[in-house]
């Protein structure tokens, strides 16, 4: 009898923490349901549906036949796939660093005690609230080779004013980058400004007493203080640049030739122009895997540096 009582006490002790953990986890799941339900409906289900479609020949009228991995084989044997992936990464290489540097410079300027600081901050942030289509049409007119204000301004200051910004392969990427930087630099600036305001002013005062100049203060105080914000900025800008579509679709249509065709536009043309939704779904899955790999690499690099 004594043995049975002891066994019961042990089982009660073991069961009690488990029941408490179960109740706690159940409460956590209930709190997360308002997020999990839309996430499952509007993200997980479309991804699973797209993966299923990628295994079929699928047109505008629906599924036609099951082809297995044939769509994926077609992607990796298509030379255009590698070209458009390179175009997407090329835009990352020229746009992400430029918008981060510009945003940091603006944040450093506005963080100073200058007049009309709030107005200047609002002026740079306002373009970010506009849609990509509005931004693209604005810069489409600005870069007009005949009547555009940019070429007219170049003529006024004595520079060549007959540049074909959107039809010359030597200038088109820089035109798209300039438009994108103008659109997104306000958001980058605000994040850096928030990071700058979190750095204690005592650090700068101590550095001045020790005789540190502006460059040493920036290098040893500002940059380390902005390390977390910088990681977020780099991660976000890389993913955002890889998803380039609206500017290219409206401003250049992928031209001149295939110079500005990116992966997202490649998927769009395959699905909505060529009526090959199965192949477009396979392209989307492949590109999604590429972006996930980039995200994993970034997390690993930041963890190793930490």
Image (cartoon, rainbow, N blue to C red):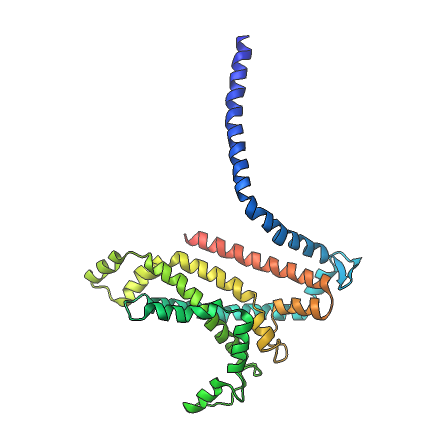
Q: Which quarter of the figure is the N terminus placed in?
A: top right
Above or below residue 181? Residue 230 is: above
Who's the residue at 50% across and 69% down the image? 130
Tell me what residue is drawn at x 49 percent, y 64 percent.
237
Q: Position of residue 47 (x, y in %)?
A: 65, 54
Residue at the right extreme, as displayed: 65
Query: Is residue 265 or residue 142 the one in the foreground?
Result: 142
Residue 260 visible at all: no
At 24% from the left and 66% from the top, the residue drawn is 213
Q: Is residue 89 left or right of residue 77?
A: left
Q: Position of residue 82 (x, y in %)?
A: 63, 68
Q: Is residue 187 visible?
A: yes
Q: Is residue 180 above or below residue 63?
A: below
Residue at 45% across, 91% down: 155
- Return the x and y of residue 10 as percentages of the image width and height: 52, 19
- Where is residue 85 drawn, in percent x and y? 60, 67
Name the quadrant containing residue 283: bottom right
Using the image as rendered, state which of residue 182 and residue 225 is in the foreground: 182
Is 39 positioned to the left or the right of 61 in the image?
A: left
Camera-side residue: 41 or 104? 41
């Amino acid at each position: 009898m004594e043995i049975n009582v002891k066994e019961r006490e042990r089982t009660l002790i073991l069961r009690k923490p488990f029941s408490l953990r179960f109740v706690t986890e159940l409460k956590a799941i209930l709190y997360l349901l308002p997020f999990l339900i839309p996430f499952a409906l509007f993200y997980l289900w479309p991804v699973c549906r797209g993966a299923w479609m990628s295994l079929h020949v699928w047109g505008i009228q629906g599924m036609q036949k099951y082809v297995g991995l044939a769509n994926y084989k077609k992607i990796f044997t298509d030379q255009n796939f590698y070209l458009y992936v390179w175009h997407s990464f090329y835009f990352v290489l020229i746009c992400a660093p430029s918008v981060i540097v510009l945003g940091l410079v603006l944040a450093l300027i506005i963080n100073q005690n200058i007049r009309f600081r709030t107005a200047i901050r609002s002026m740079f942030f306002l373009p970010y609230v506009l849609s990509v289509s509005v931004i693209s049409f604005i810069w489409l007119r600005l870069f007009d080779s005949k009547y555009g204000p940019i070429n007219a301004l170049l003529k006024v200051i004595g520079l060549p004013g007959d540049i074909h910004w959107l039809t010359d392969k030597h200038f088109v990427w820089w035109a798209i980058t300039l438009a994108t930087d103008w659109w997104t630099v306000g958001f980058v600036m605000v994040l850096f400004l928030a990071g700058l305001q979190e750095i204690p002013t005592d650090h700068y005062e101590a550095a001045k007493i020790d005789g540190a100049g502006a460059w040493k203060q920036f290098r040893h105080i500002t940059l380390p203080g902005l390390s977390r914000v910088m990681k977020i900025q780099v991660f976000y800008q890389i993913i955002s640049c890889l998803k380039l579509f609206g500017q290219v679709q409206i401003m250049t249509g992928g031209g001149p030739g295939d110079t500005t065709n990116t992966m997202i536009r490649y998927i769009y043309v395959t699905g909505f122009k060529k009526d090959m939704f199965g192949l477009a779904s396979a392209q989307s899955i492949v590109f999604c895997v590429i972006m996930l790999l980039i995200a994993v690499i970034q997390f690993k690099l930041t963890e190793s540096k930490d």
